[in-house]
Amino acid sequence: MNIAVVGTLDSKGHEHAFVAEQIKAKGHTPILIDLGTGSDPQVTPDFTRFQVAAANSTDLQALIDRQDRGECVVAMSKAAPVFISQLVADGKIDGIISLGGGGGTALGTSVMRELPIGFPKVMVSTLASGNTAHYVGTKDIVMIPSIVDVAGLNRISKTIFRQAAGAICGMVDSSQQDEEESKPLIVASMFGNTTDCINHAAKVLENAGYEVLIFHATGMGGKTMESLIESGMVAGVLDLTTTEWADELLGATLSAGPTRMDAMTKAKIPAVIAPGCLDMANYGERETLPAKFEGRTIYIHNPQVTLLRTNAEECAQLGKIIAEKANANSAPTAILNPLKTVSIISAKGQPFYDPAADKALFDAIHANATVEVIDYDEEINSTVFAEAAASKLLELIKAAN
């Protein structure tokens, strides 16, 4: 198997070459790729920095001549993902490893974040022991602390680099051993308040021959689900818990950002959508609730979570957003409305019961949707609604094929 050893070979060439030697000793073929933009590389790469830059139509020499390191690094961070993604698409590499400090980590992970989930990725970094969220994103990047700086070969760095090489080789070997036909994937969004619905719908889909991956709609969960959808690995989307949009609209804590629900459109994946848990936005402890919401209906879910009930005006905005996101998808798509309640706590007699707000939500969906909209006089967690959602998704997947 071929493993890309990617990094700034002008400053850390010997370290990457050492890793390449370890990979070769384990029976794999290392491919050295230079992302450096300073002096000449310390070792001879298999792909030069100029070949990498050309993948994004970048005149790297002109940038180097201006001697603006920041400009060079930014340009390479845009070109490298394009170049290496093409190697992956062409089947020329089976894994990737990189070593770096701040700049090297930014470069290496900018590449890895563009590669498919399941493709082996290892980043040895001086920053691996801190907050790595902006380096890892929603991808399966293995971050290994370098312990000492990635600056020379010594008894500590050699140990770490040797083990990192072993890790990437093991990951490549394992991924190859599991290359068997698997069930097609369906992703589903879930919250505590929609658990019964998703669990029942998942059983229906599994009985139909699908594997269902469930993501908790907590911001990062939605982002990760979107990343997987965009990868093209998914056959269908059961997005019944779109609550993250309430947090996005109200500036609450569990937002998945403004691109939530865009991946199905990019990948053209059939989808069934519901306004699950759009009755609530999530904040932290009671005292963290913004002052502008004082006097509104709230529910203390636990000491760390305060839920704010969305009002009719906000629900109308959310209904419009959900409809427009669904409309954008060229693949078969439908919205299902559970008219009795969109969560456990918005049912009659519960803290968030607000028929006017719910009506504003459903009316806005109908007013703005061009996709099929189906109303059910059911609670979102009813067996009838769950089975209807699962059956509708199976119907849409069949129509798409």
Image (spheres, rainbow, N blue to C red):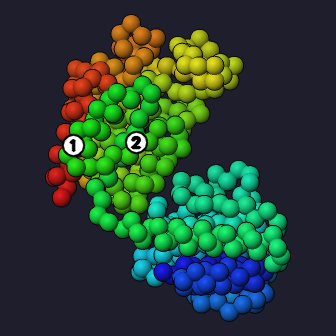
Q: Looking at the image, which residue sits at the far top? A: 349
Q: Position of residue 157 (x, y in %)?
A: 78, 71
Split into 4 quadrants, where in the image is the C terminus? bottom left
Q: Position of residue 347 (x, y in %)?
A: 36, 14
Mark 1 / mark 2, whichever is N-terminal: 1
Q: Secondary structure at mark 2?
A: strand
Examine the rendered structure and indicate whether residue 278 appears above or below residue 221. above
In the picture of the structure, the residue carrying the numbered disc 1 is: 207
Q: Looking at the image, which residue sits at the far front? A: 26
In the picture of the structure, the residue carrying the numbered disc 2 is: 214
Q: Looking at the image, which residue sits at the far bottom? A: 44
Q: Position of residue 308 (x, y in %)?
A: 54, 21
Task: Tell me the tag on residue 264.
Answer: none
Residue 20 visible in image = no
> In front here: 198 or 284?
198
Residue at the (62%, 15%) spot, across then down: 294
Amino acid type assigned to the residue bearing label 1 in the image:
Asn
